Image (spheres, rainbow, N blue to C red):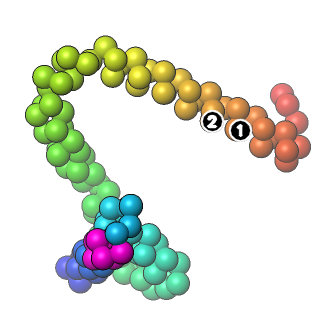
Amino acid sequence: MIPALTLILCFQLVGEVASRGLNLPLPGPVVGLVLLVFACSASPALVQRLRPVAQSLLSHLSLFFVPAGVGVVTHMPTIAQHGIGIGIALAVSTVLAIAAGALTFAAVARLIGTPDD
């Protein structure tokens, strides 16, 4: 488990170095994740080696939201001041995202010839 976790962290480190060194607009962990996906596509054995660690991390995914919760608490005065606007923006963007997904699904269904019920 330790070697697999070390491998994941090495991909993150390589991504961080590449992101900063090449002045990429993406965060280092995202670049590292993309590199990890390409490496896993090239080597199925790597997938089997990383699977237990990935499943373990995913089972404790709620721990990764603690920093976001701390950020919300830290910025509580700003949220209190602009809460109504933030709420409206969240509601409107959610409705628009659902509508865009439904319209896209309907368009693709028409393109592939799926019969309507």
**Which residue type does callout 1 highlight?**
Phe
Other-residue count near label 1 (Cα within 10 Å), few / some / many at <14 / 14–19 / ≥20: few
Number of the label disc, if any, that sits on residue 105: 1
Q: Is residue 36 above or below residue 26?
A: below
User: Split into 4 quadrants, where in the image is the N terminus?
Assistant: bottom left
Q: Is residue 52 visible?
A: no
The front one of 81 and 117 is 81
Residue shown at 30% from the left, 76% from the top: 21
- Give 65 or 49, whichever is nearer the viewer: 65
The quarter of the image holding the C terminus is top right
In the rendered image, which residue does mark 2 sit on?
101
Q: Secondary structure at mark 1?
A: helix
**Left or right: where 57 falls relative to 77:** right
Viewer-proximal residue, 81 or 10?
Answer: 81
Q: Is residue 20 magenta?
A: yes
Q: Which residues are magenta?
A: 16-22
Q: Looking at the picture, which amino acid does disc 2 mark?
A: Gly
- Residue 59, percent from left and from top: 29, 55
Whole-percent x and y of residue 70?
A: 13, 39
Mark 2, secondary structure of its residue = helix
Q: Nearer the viewer, residue 55 or 15?
A: 15
